[in-house]
Amino acid sequence: MRILHTMLRVGDLERSTDFYTNVLGMKVLRKNDYPDGRFTLCFVGYGEESEEAVLELTYNWDKDSYDLGTGYGHIAVEVDDAYRACEEVRKRGGKVTREAGPMKHGTTVIAFVEDPDGYKIEFIQRRAA
C-alpha cells in the first residue's frame, strides 16, 4: 500500500494551480472537468502519480471558499535548503508563515508557507548524509 494523494478543496482553481506550480514548483499532472457534477479535479505534484504521492485540487464550481476545519494539519515537502526555499517562495509572491529554523524541541530545520486558500505547507530540510 502507498499514499496516492491528498485532496484539498480550493476556492479558485486558477489561483491555486498557479501557487502550486509557480511558487512551489510542482507540475500539473492531469486536469478533468466533470460538468454533470459541476466540479474540476486538478492533480499536481513533483513526479508522476505512479511513483509519488500528489495533491488533488478539487474545485466545486458553485463554491468559492471553504473553512479550513480543525482536523487538517499540513502537507509536508522535503527541500534541500529550507532557508533558500523560503526566499524562493517570497520571491515568487508566496507567503511564509514560519521562517526556516530548527523545530521546537528538536534539530530538524523546518519552515511553513501558506497557499492561497490558507492551507499550510511544511518544508522539511533534508538531513545531510
Image (cartoon, rainbow, N blue to C red):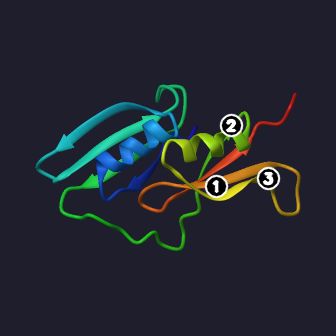
Return the residue nearer the eye: 26 or 99: 99
Q: Does the image show residue 77?
A: no
Q: Are marks 2 and 3 in contact (CB under 8 Å)?
A: no
The quadrant in which the N terminus is found is top right
Rounded to the nearest whole Å, what is the CA distance between mark 1 and mark 2?
Answer: 12 Å
Q: Residue furthest front?
A: 91
Q: Which residue is mark 1?
A: 112
Label 1 residue SS: strand
For residue 32, which quarter of the picture? top left
Residue 58 as seen in the image, left or right of residue 35:
right
Q: Residue at x 33, y 31 (%)?
A: 30
Residue drawn at x 43%, y 45% as measured from the top left: 19
Q: CA distance from mark 1 to mark 3?
A: 10 Å
Is 83 or 55 nearer to us in this picture? 83
- SS at mark 3 in the image: strand
Q: Position of residue 3 (x, y in %)?
A: 55, 41
Using the image as rendered, state which of residue 85 and residue 61 is in the foreground: 85
Q: Disc 2 marks which residue? A: 79
Cα gap from disc 2 to disc 3, whole angstroms: 13 Å
The numbered mark at residue 101 is: 3
Nearest to N terminus: mark 1 or mark 2: 2
Amino acid type, residue under disc 3 in the picture: Gly
State the residue at coordinates (54%, 42%). Answer: 91
User: Badge 1 local density, few (<14 within 10 Å), some, or many (20+)?
Assistant: many
- Where does the image place residue 64, in percent across and percent down from the top left? 26, 64
Q: Inspect the image, locate mark 1, and give the three-letter code of the amino acid beneath it.
A: Phe
Q: Residue 62's quadrant in the figure?
A: bottom left
Assess whether mark 2 and mark 1 are in contact (beta carbons under 8 angstroms).
no
Residue 79 visible to the viewer: yes
Give the total number of marks visible in the rendering.
3
